Image (tube, rainbow, N blue to C red):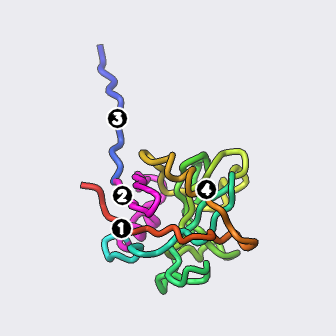
Amino acid sequence: MESKEKTVTTYQQVDINTTHGPIVVELWDDVAPGHVENFIKLTKAGFYDGLSFHRIIPNFVIQGGCPEGTGTGGPGWNVDAEFNDRPHDEGVLSMARSADPNSAGSQFFICLGREHCQHLDGQYTGFGRVVDGIEVVRTIGGADTDGRDCPMEPIVMTEVKMKD
């Protein structure tokens, strides 16, 4: 009798500590290796420490990672698109970009639900998901915002680091 063992993939994880509580994400290096490598590089360099979630759209996404805090900044380089089959469900970590599919840099978003994110499938690179702290993501997603989807009170990533 032949043994068929199920392969379990162990993903690297990142702690995103925020002023609203901790979020832990796993990174899908099997479907988006370039985006995972970029995110880890930025994380290890302390790039995200002190940056905010500058864009919040209820029932859609929370977005952060802009060094300008306006949605216009990045790390100074771009990452080519790695569109994949992973659906943009609640808690999926994906890279923000401009109209150019190969313009992702440092800005990322976390989906707040499948209903309003399904149109992102195949258009944005999902490269991870929240494995702990989805309630923190939901709380951030419910924050009061101004007319430009900016939170009324800063929501800061106090420390972003690789999980031990």
> In 3D space, how far apart are the residues under numbered discs 2 and 4 (Cα atoms)?
18 Å
Determine contact: label 1, label 2, CB under 8 Å. yes
Amino acid type for the residue under numbered disc 2: Asp
Residue for point 56% across, 57% down: 140
> In 3D space, how far apart are the residues under numbered discs 1 and 4 (Cα atoms)?
19 Å
Residue for point 34% across, 24% down: 4
Q: Nearer the viewer, residue 79 or 90?
A: 90
Where is residue 127 drawn, in percent x and y? 49, 57
Magenta-highlighted residues = 13-42
Circle 3 is placed at which residue position?
7
Amino acid type for the residue under numbered disc 1: Glu
Whichever of labels 4 and 3 marks the residue nearer the N terminus, that label is 3
Q: Is residue 121 above or below residue 51?
A: above
Disc 1 vs disc 2: which is toward the camera?
1
Whichever of labels 3 and 2 marks the residue nearer the N terminus, that label is 3
Q: Please state if 29 lies on the left or on the right of 2 as rendered.
A: right
Whichever of labels 2 and 4 marks the residue nearer the N terminus, that label is 2
Amino acid type for the residue under numbered disc 4: Gly
Whichever of labels 3 and 1 marks the residue nearer the N terminus, that label is 3
Residue 15 has which mark?
2
Q: Name the secondary structure under disc 3.
A: loop
Residue 159 has which mark?
1
Residue for point 41% across, 75% down: 50
Circle 4 is placed at which residue position?
141
Whichever of labels 1 and 2 marks the residue nearer the N terminus, that label is 2
Q: Please state if 35 lies on the left or on the right of 113 as rendered.
A: left
Where is residue 19 drawn, in percent x and y? 44, 63
Where is residue 95 drawn, in percent x and y? 55, 65
Does the stretch in magenta take in 146? no
Which residue, as the protein is rendered here, is positioned at the far left?
164
Which residue, as the protein is rendered here, is positioned at the far top?
1
Disc 3 vs disc 2: which is toward the camera?
2
